[in-house]
Image (cartoon, rainbow, N blue to C red):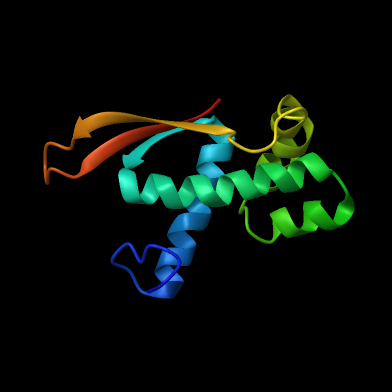
Amino acid sequence: MAGYRKLGRPSDQRRAMLRSLVTNFLKHGRMETTEARAKETRSIAEKMITLGKKGDLHSRRQVLSYVTEEAVVQKLFSEVAPKYEGRNGGYTRMYKAGPRRGDGAEVVILELV
């Protein structure tokens, strides 16, 4: 069994989608998406915030290799990460928003605590 969700996509498309989701989540601090995508996004976003808390050059480069916008990386290191300095994980919160009208997929709202 794989240690991640495949989300019905080939690996290159899945990676591109998750990079985009994580970048937009860190940019806006909130997003509405399906439960499976939100759980994967949350996992990666929390790792990015933890790297942001370290604040050294190596961590910045690791985040830059994943997040697609430099402005978002700047925001992560200057605004988002310092907010969670005294917190060991658990930077995000998920609310169920009910089923999606078109296909009945469970929709959640993912946000920074």
Q: Position of residue 71 (x, y in %)?
A: 69, 41
Residue drawn at (71%, 55%) of the image: 64
Q: Is residue 100 left or right of residue 27?
A: left
Quarter containing the C terminus: top right
In the foreground, 74 or 80: 80
Work out whether 91 lies above or below 65.
above
Quarter containing the N terminus: bottom left
Residue drawn at (12%, 46%) of the image: 103
Work out whether 4 lies above or below 75.
below
Residue drawn at (70%, 37%) of the image: 76
Q: Residue furthest right?
A: 56
Residue drawn at (64%, 38%) of the image: 89
Work out whether 100 lies above or below 112.
below
Q: Position of residue 112 (x, y in %)?
A: 55, 29
Tally the marks: 0
Q: Is residue 19 left or right of residue 71?
A: left
Q: Is residue 83 left or right of residue 22?
A: right
Q: Position of residue 91 (x, y in %)?
A: 59, 33
Q: Is residue 95 left or right of residue 112?
A: left
Q: Position of residue 108 (x, y in %)?
A: 32, 35
